[in-house]
Every structure is written in structure tokens, then in C-alpha cells.
Image (cartoon, grey):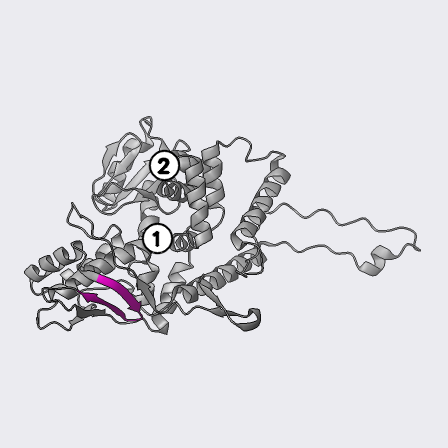
């Protein structure tokens, strides 16, 4: 989190409702796409579906590819940059869009905090497909309004088209840029997500906590009587370890990520030891343990310190941060078994796997291609684990870049329905 020191040690919060991004370096797009994520492509499609002249779009894409777009500034409802054209002086170009009102943000936040995996995905700079239609967050045709100081009256002109294509690259890197375009800064959203998640967790804990038997302190300390009453029986072991406290960033305090990881580790290992008498970490490989560590904190990948955690863990095991991020998603989906499903293809026996394809067709879902323990469509995939559960995966259409999504289940149709939010 960006902060600046004020006098006498006070700390002033950085207002992140205005963000500037340096010029995006030119790069080739061999498949003709400027965006690598589904939400980045939704942004591009919103402009392309509104454009009146495909030729101007093509020239704008070429401008973007050749690096004609200078630094981009994003504020609520507006994306602005100078774009170089055929004249020496660049043109001031902007894309305007509607910001969400309070009701729209309430709808989005309710949807984002309805499921823990949605919160984890957002903190990992990912947008679950289930949030696609919530509150009109993503632009639809006509939502993006281009404007440029050039004399061309095209809608859009090639300069505005170039800015739109380059903005899609920013969205690929950080979906919180889209949220800023819609009116909310990253710090404000993260604070609200954290507050709602903590409130939901506290409510769940209160509902599950058994009443605690007590002994009055006066009675326990009264040694003059005939004898002390017996101590209450130990509390029953909870179903799962509790969540650690929220450690707010403070320049004078230890790293909050390190504190959170230590607290999470202690709670998880103590719970396992009380339940089984065994240390759950002892049997893990170094790679499994690294994935477990990265997955233990829901904010991994969010701040500079957590990105450093990903980088350092991946480097120590000769993997890439993307490898680790994908493995973390699998671990959060199903633990060690979920990681095995991600990394191992195997030949399942006849039975549940053979019955899955006709069941999916009967449910009105498109045909899936079988390969070993996997059933693949254009953007959805199911993998059968050795535990008999079906694990859902998603990718951009026809990209074969599969990421674990949703919760595993015994029924393939139910698993896909949960993935699609149906």
C-alpha cells in the first residue's frame, strides 16, 4: 500500500482514485488479440461491437502495437492518454464510461463476498466468471464513449481505438483498474471486502461455537471449603482451525503477511495435532509445502510483500510465479488432492467417467472432448480425481490455459452448475 509520511511520524493515506501507468511497450499479438484475460477481452469487444468503421479499428490496433500510446491515466469514469498520429503533436484521447452507483457496488460486493473462493480470486487479481453479470461491472456495447482532439469524426477514431486496446492490457495485469474505472479505488474496495469477509467469518464462528461451561472465580478460589469443584471438561475440537486476526499494515509493526502466515501455520498444525497426533506437514514434498504456504493466506499476490512471497517460493523450486499461482488455486480447490488433479493425467476405469458425457449432454451443456481423466469444452473443463470427485476448470475460449475454479463435487453436472453460478 502506498503511503507518505507526514510530520511527527503521522501517516497519510495515498488516494488511489487516480492512477497513472507508464507507456506499455509494443508487443506482437500473433493471434490478433490484445487481451489475455476474459475481462480484458470483454473490454475490447465492448468497443469493437460499437465501432462504425472496422478500418479505423484496424489502424488503431496497429497504432497500439507500434507503441503510439503514451502513459495512461485512469480515474473514475475516464481513461486518458496522449496518442501519436501522423502529426508531430500528439492528440489528447480519452474513453469515458459510466460509474456504478451505491446500489451497484452493494450488488457487486454482496456477490464477491458470497463465496470465499470469490474473495480469494479477487485478491489474486482474478475475476471469477460468476461475477461477470453482477451489477453491470463489465462494459457492454455502447458503454465506452470515445473522444479525441484529432479532426477525425469517426466513432471511434484510430487514436481512441488504440487507447482502448492498450487499456485492455492494463486490465489484464490488474482487474482493480476496471473497478477504478467504475468508480472505486483499490484500497477502498479491499477494506470493504476485508470488513465483509471478517463479519461473515465471525457470524459463522458464532453460529458454530458451543456454549462454554464456566466456574465462578469466587468458587474456584475458595480454598476454605470442603473442596474445589472439578474443572470443566475440555472444549470439543472445532471442525477446522480458526482464522487469524487481521493485521493492519503499520510502518512501525512487523510485516503483516509474515504475522498472518505464522498465525495460520500455528493454528492449522495445532488443530491437526490435537485431532490426529500427527504433523500434516511432515509427509509433503518441498513443492507441496511451498504451495500450501502460499495458499494459506487469502491475500497472496495482492501486495508487494505477497508478490515477493510467490516469487521467492517459485524461484527456490525452479518454478515460475504463474506455476505457483495455478497450483495455489488447485490447493484452495481441493488441498493435496486438488494439486494432484492439476498436475497428473491418468486413465480412470469405466463407470463414472463414461457416464459423465451423456449426463452433461442431457443437462443441455455443450459436448466435451474426453482425454484420459479430463472432459474439455471451449472454456470449461472437468477433471476426475482419484478421490472420485469432479474438479472444475476454466480457460479463455480455445486457449487451453486451464485454471482450477469452484468446488469439487461427486456429480459432474452439479460441479459445472456451481462453476457457472446456476
Alpha carbon distance from label 2 to label 1: 18 Å
Q: Is residue 19 left or right of residue 253?
A: left
**The quadrant where residue 163 appears:** bottom left
Q: Which residue is identified by label 2?
A: 342
The answer to whether any part of residue 408 appears in the image is no
Instruction: Estimate how packed mark 1 is, as few (under 14), some (14 to 19) or many (20 or more) residues with alpha carbons within 10 Å.
Output: some
The one of 329 and 7 positioned closer to us in this rendering: 7
For the stretch drawn in magenta, the main secondary structure is strand
Q: Earlier in the sequence, mark 2 or mark 1?
A: 1
Residue 383 falls in which quadrant of the image? top left
Q: Where in the figure is residue 75, as x and y percent of width and height?
A: 31, 70
Residue 167 found in image quarter? bottom left
Task: Tell me: residue 306, above or below residue 74.
Answer: above
Q: Position of residue 306 (x, y in %)?
A: 45, 50
Residue 231: give x, y in percent of width and height.
78, 49
Residue 231 makes an appearance in the image: yes
Vertical arrangement, residue 153 with respect to residue 351, above or below:
below
**Residue at numbered disc 1:** 126
212 to the left or right of 204: right
Determine crowd level at label 2: few under 14, some 14-19, many 20+ residues with C-alpha closer than 10 A. Answer: many
- Which of discs 2 and 1 lies nearer the camera? The answer is 1
**Residue sitting nearer the eye, 272 or 266:** 266
Amino acid at each position: 500500500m502506498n503511503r507518505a509520511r507526514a510530520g511527527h511520524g503521522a501517516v497519510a493515506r495515498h488516494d488511489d482514485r487516480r492512477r497513472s501507468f507508464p507507456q506499455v511497450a509494443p508487443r506482437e499479438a500473433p493471434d490478433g488479440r490484445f487481451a489475455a484475460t476474459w475481462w480484458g477481452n470483454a473490454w475490447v469487444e465492448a468497443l469493437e461491437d460499437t465501432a462504425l468503421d472496422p478500418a479505423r479499428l484496424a489502424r488503431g490496433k496497429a497504432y497500439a502495437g507500434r507503441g503510439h500510446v503514451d502513459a495512461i491515466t485512469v480515474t473514475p469514469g475516464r481513461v486518458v492518454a496522449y496518442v501519436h498520429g501522423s502529426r508531430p503533436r500528439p492528440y489528447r484521447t480519452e474513453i469515458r464510461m459510466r460509474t456504478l452507483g451505491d446500489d451497484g457496488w452493494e450488488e457487486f460486493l454482496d456477490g464477491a463476498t458470497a463465496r470465499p473462493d470469490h474473495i480469494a480470486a479477487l485478491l489474486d487479481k482474478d475475476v471469477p466468471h460468476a461475477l461477470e453479470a453482477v451489477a453491470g461491472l463489465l462494459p457492454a456495447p455502447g458503454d465506452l464513449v470515445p473522444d479525441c482532439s484529432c479532426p477525425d469524426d469517426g466513432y471511434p477514431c484510430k487514436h481512441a481505438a488504440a487507447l482502448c486496446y492498450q487499456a485492455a492490457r492494463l486490465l489484464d495485469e490488474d482487474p482493480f483498474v476496471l473497478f477504478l474505472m467504475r468508480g472505486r479505488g483499490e484500497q477502498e474496495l479491499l477494506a470493504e471486502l476485508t470488513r465483509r469477509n471478517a463479519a461473515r467469518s465471525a457470524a459463522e464462528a458464532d453460529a458454530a461455537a458451543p456454549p462454554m461451561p464456566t466456574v465462578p472465580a469466587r468458587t474456584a478460589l475458595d480454598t476454605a471449603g470442603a473442596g474445589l469443584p472439578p474443572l470443566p471438561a475440555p472444549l470439543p475440537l472445532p471442525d477446522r482451525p480458526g482464522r487469524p486476526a487481521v493485521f493492519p499494515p503499520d510502518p512501525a509493526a512487523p510485516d503483516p503477511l509474515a504475522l498472518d502466515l505464522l498465525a495460520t501455520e500455528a493454528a492449522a498444525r495445532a488443530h491437526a495435532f490435537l485431532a490426529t497426533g500427527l504433523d500434516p506437514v511432515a509427509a509433503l514434498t518441498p513443492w507441496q509445502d511451498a504451495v500450501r504456504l502460499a495458499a494459506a493466506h487469502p491475500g497472496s499476490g495482492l501486495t508487494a510483500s505477497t508478490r515477493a512471497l510467490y516469487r521467492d517460493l517459485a524461484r527456490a523450486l525452479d518454478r515460475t510465479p504463474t506455476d505457483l499461482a495455478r497450483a495455489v488455486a488447485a490447493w484452495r480447490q481441493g488441498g493435496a488432492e486438488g494439486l494432484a488433479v492439476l498436475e497428473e493425467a491418468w486413465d480412470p476405469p469405466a463407470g463414472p467417467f463414461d457416464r459423465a458425457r451423456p449426463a452433461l449432454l442431457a443437462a443441455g451443456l455443450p459436448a466435451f472432448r474426453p482425454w484420459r481423466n479430463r472432459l474439455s469444452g471451449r472454456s470449461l473443463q472437468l477433471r476426475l480425481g482419484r478421490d472420485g470427485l469432479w474438479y472444475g476448470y476454466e480457460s479463455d475460449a480455445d486457449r487451453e490455459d486451464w485454471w482450477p475454479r469452484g468446488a469439487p463435487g461427486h456429480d459432474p453436472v452439479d460441479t459445472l452448475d456451481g462453476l457457472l453460478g446456476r
